[in-house]
Image (cartoon, grey):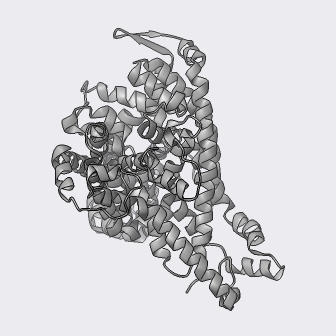
């Protein structure tokens, strides 16, 4: 099953090789667990400690007494229900916009081949070359006063949803996938008189489930993890996301409450990760580099 | 192909003609069809194109304009090169570039080398690979505010876990984020922990594509582990490595969120002020959009070179 790698199987089969293998393996497993899971354990258990216990030296490994009520207090004090709802609202709104508009655009560019299609795709991909941070200032000014419509999108979810559509990388991934769908399949549909919309719905989308899954996960996680843009465009505390809300409240609450809030904020994306691990990993390696 | 008569014909029906080419069609009908087809195609495109126009393409143009404009009391005037001179004469400018360069170098030493080494080691294991991969990627999924505040506690000079660990090994306690000498390194360590998962998985995928015979051949020549890494693993993954290196440089030179959240942006004695934080300050603390755009332009020019190389290399990989 496993392919040949750096160390030869013969070497591994020898007693010395076996011992060395298991020793390094055990060391790496312990080290990685400590390094990557340790801080998470510290966070979850820290949320159960009393304020004194969180800041005491040396720190305790196991909470002296369990204070699950920290979590409910964090929920109330930091208004996590609202922050959580806001973040979900922005994330799934952005997902809906990206799925509808980006899929339609990629389908058009890949299959309908409009006049200037190549130029439009080129201009979309060109945005990948501009460092994102350079555009934050003019984008912010655009949100303050959208040209033509003369609307101010500050504190409005549109300020998150609409710019999220300008994801050239997603369009590129989707287009490449659509390109790989056999031509005969689509030609047959159009000979049967199916409209482009119908072909998209009944043939292209069902085949494209894996790539749609990957794009969806990245869309939701992208909004969940964003900090600077929501901080700039949603200054109203009632409209903030988890990241911004917790950060702006972080200095005013006791440590244990704050740590409990961090745990709660981390749960949704960690759940997404544990549920869709396979898709995320394959998506990363499928499209991680091409740009 | 025949003489260039009406080009609309060719543009309109490049594919279908293969199936229906033998059916004679009146010219007017074909034009109407082409128009309809294009209208449909552009109908599918319009939403995304509008979003790009307003939130990507227009801001790109605006960035260039802003860099040469001044806005005072709601009136916009042409400012020529004055924004650029303002930026260049700001003492913070050079400090920000020094800090950003330091961050980039440290992030390359840690954030570029560590994931590769981790991937090389993980690739050798025949057990628990899924678990280890999941561990490395776990922090990538945390909201940044959680990882950052977590690290703030771990770095705390009073009760932080890191000093506790140093003490356990008999090493002196550090001030971490509060000391200008260690603040940037502390930010890089946190940033590496937060972000190394993606790179590690990409390297792992690349390593799995190396043909095993190459290692066998190297062994016949008597190569040890290190020589095999140097003469087989590295050359075989060279393209991915160079792409990731460029991507890392482009990403780290734009670093903002980590120092902003960990040290408030400037850090002790301005030791973590990065270029992008300076842009942020110009725009949102001093309301000087012109200077922010001018500095953005400097960054853009610098990174455009790296981007161009990146695109060239990734094209080469595609072929």
Q: Is residue B278 left or right of residue B319?
A: left
Q: Residue at x 66, y 59 (%)?
A: B239
Residue B73 shows in the view:
yes
Whole-percent x, y for residue A237 in the image: 22, 35
User: Is B248 or B182 nearer to us in this picture?
Assistant: B182
Q: Nearer the viewer, residue A129 or B303?
A: B303
Residue B214, quarter of picture: bottom right
- Image: A119 above or below A233: below
Percent of width and height locating residue B263: 45, 36
Residue A235 place in picture, x, y as percent: 26, 31
Residue B314 visible here: no
* Left or right for B99, reference A97: right
Residue positioned 48% across, 51% down in the render: B10
How many marks the image carries: the answer is 0
Residue A228, image quadrant: top left
Asked if residue B265 lies left or right of residue A10, the reply is left
For the point 81% across and 83% down, which residue is it?
Answer: B220
Q: Residue at x 44, y 40 (%)?
A: B262
Q: Can you give x and y, in whole percent of width and height, for residue A166 in the image?
A: 38, 43
Q: Quadrant of the N terminus of chain A?
A: bottom right
| Relative height, residue B50 to residue A105 (above, below) | above
Instruction: Indicate whether A47 appears above or below B298.
Output: below
């Amino acid at each position: 099953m496993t392919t040949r790698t750096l160390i030869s199987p013969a070497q591994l089969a020898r007693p010395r090789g076996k011992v060395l293998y298991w020793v390094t393996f055990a060391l790496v497993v312990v080290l990685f667990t400590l390094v990557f899971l340790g801080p998470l354990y510290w966070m979850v258990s820290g949320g159960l400690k009393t304020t004194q216990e969180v800041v005491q030296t040396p720190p305790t490994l196991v909470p002296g007494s369990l204070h699950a009520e920290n979590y409910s207090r964090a929920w109330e004090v930091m208004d996590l229900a609202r922050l959580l709802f806001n973040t979900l609202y922005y994330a799934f709104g952005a997902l809906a916009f990206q799925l509808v508009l980006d899929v339609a655009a990629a389908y058009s560019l890949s299959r309908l081949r409009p006049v200037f299609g190549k130029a439009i795709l080129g201009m979309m991909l060109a945005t990948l070359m501009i460092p994102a941070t350079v555009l934050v200032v003019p984008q912010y000014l655009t949100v303050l006063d959208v040209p033509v419509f003369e609307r101010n999108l500050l504190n409005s979810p549109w300020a998150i949803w609409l710019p999220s559509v300008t994801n050239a990388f997603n369009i590129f991934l989707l287009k490449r996938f659509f390109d790989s769908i056999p031509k005969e399949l689509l030609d047959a549909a159009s000979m049967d008189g199916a409209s482009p919309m119908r072909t998209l719905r009944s043939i292209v989308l069902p085949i494209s489930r894996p790539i749609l899954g990957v794009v969806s996960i990245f869309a939701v996680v992208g909004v969940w993890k964003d900090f600077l843009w929501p901080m700039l465009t949603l200054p109203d505390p009632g409209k903030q996301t988890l990241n911004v809300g917790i950060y702006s409240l972080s200095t005013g609450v006791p440590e244990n409450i704050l740590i409990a809030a961090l745990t709660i904020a981390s749960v949704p994306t960690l759940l997404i990760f544990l549920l869709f691990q396979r898709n995320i990993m394959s998506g990363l390696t499928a499209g991680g580099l091409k740009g | 192909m025949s003489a260039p008569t009406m080009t609309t014909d060719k543009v309109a029906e490049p594919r279908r003609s293969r199936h229906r080419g033998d059916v004679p069609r009146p010219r007017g009908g074909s034009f109407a069809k082409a128009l309809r087809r294009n209208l449909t195609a552009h109908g599918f495109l319009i939403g995304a194109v509008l979003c790009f126009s307003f939130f990507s393409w227009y801001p790109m143009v605006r960035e260039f304009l802003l860099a040469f404009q001044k806005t005072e009391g709601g009136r916009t005037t042409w400012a020529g090169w004055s924004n650029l001179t303002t930026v260049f004469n700001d003492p913070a400018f050079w400090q920000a570039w020094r800090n950003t360069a330091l961050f980039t170098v440290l992030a390359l030493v840690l954030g570029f080398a560590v994931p590769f080494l981790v991937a090389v080691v993980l690739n050798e294991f025949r057990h628990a690979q899924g678990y280890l991969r999941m561990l490395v990627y776990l922090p990538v999924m945390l909201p940044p505010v959680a990882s950052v505040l977590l690290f703030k506690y771990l770095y705390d000079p009073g009760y932080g876990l890191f000093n506790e660990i140093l003490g356990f090994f008999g090493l002196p306690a550090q001030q971490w984020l509060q000391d200008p000498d260690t603040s940037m390194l502390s930010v890089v360590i946190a940033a590496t922990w937060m972000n190394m998962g993606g790179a590690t998985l990409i390297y792992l995928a690349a390593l799995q594509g190396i043909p095993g015979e190459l290692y066998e051949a190297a062994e016949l020549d008597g190569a040890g582990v290190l020589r095999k890494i140097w003469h087989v693993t590295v050359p075989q993954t060279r393209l991915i490595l160079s792409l990731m290196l460029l991507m890392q440089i482009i990403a780290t030179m734009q670093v903002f969120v980590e120092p902003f959240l960990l040290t408030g942006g400037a850090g002790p004695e301005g030791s973590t002020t990065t270029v992008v934080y300076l842009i942020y300050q110009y725009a949102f603390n001093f309301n000087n959009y012109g200077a922010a755009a001018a500095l953005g332009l400097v960054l853009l020019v610098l990174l455009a070179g790296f981007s161009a190389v990146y695109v060239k290399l990734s094209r080469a990989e595609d072929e």
